[in-house]
Amino acid sequence: MRRLNLSRSAEKSLRRVPQKPQKQLAEKLLQLSIDPRPADSIKLADSDYFRVRVADYRIVYAFSTTTVEVLLVDHRDQVYRRLPR
C-alpha cells in the first residue's frame, strides 16, 4: 500500500464536492493507494500524470514506488483547465 498525499487544492476541491460523489471519490483514492494503475486509469499526454473517472469528477495524480501524489480532484469541466503545464 502506498502513502496517499493530496495537494492543498485537491483537498479544497474534495470538500466542495456533494456528499454522494465525495464518498465515491474517497473510495477511489483508497483504491489508488493500493493499485495506482487500475484498468480505468489513463496516462495524460505529454506528462507523467494519470487520471481516473469517478462519476462526473476526475482525479489527476502521479505515483512512485512509495507514494501517490493527488494533484487535482475536480469536475470534468474544470479539471483540465487547472492542470499544471
Image (cartoon, rainbow, N blue to C red):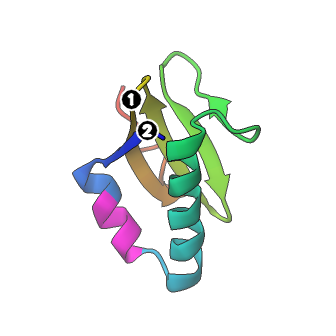
The answer for how far apart the CA atoms under marks 1 and 2 are is 5 Å
Name the residue at the front extreme: 1
Q: Nearer the viewer, residue 29 or 41?
A: 29
Q: Nearer the viewer, residue 29 or 49?
A: 29
Give yes or no for residue 49 being in the magenta stretch: no
Q: On the image, numbered disc 2 is attached to which residue? A: 2
Q: Is residue 28 left or right of residue 8?
A: right
Residue 18 horizontal/vertical position (percent): 50, 81
Q: Is residue 85 left or right of residue 61?
A: left
Which quadrant holds residue 63? Answer: top left
Residue 76 horizontal/vertical position (percent): 58, 56
User: What is the magenta range?
Assistant: 11-16
Which label's residue is closer to the chain start, 1 or 2?
2
Identified by mark 1, the residue type is Thr
Q: Secondary structure at mark 1?
A: loop
Seen at 50% across and 65% down, the residue is 26
Seen at 54% across and 75% down, the residue is 23
Q: Main secondary structure of the magenta part?
A: helix
Which quadrant holds residue 37? Answer: top right
Eyeballing the image, is 40 above or below 6?
A: above
Residue 13 horizontal/vertical position (percent): 36, 64
Q: Nearer the viewer, residue 82 or 70?
A: 70
Name the residue at the right extreme: 39
- In the picture, the quarter occupied by the C terminus is top left
Q: Is residue 74 left or right of residue 35?
A: left
Q: Nearer the viewer, residue 46 or 27?
A: 27
Q: Are discs 1 and 2 less than 8 Å apart at CB?
A: yes
Which quadrant holds residue 20? Answer: bottom right
Seen at 52% across and 55% down, the residue is 30
Residue 58 horizontal/vertical position (percent): 56, 52
Q: On the image, numbered disc 1 is attached to which residue? A: 66
Q: Is residue 82 visible?
A: no
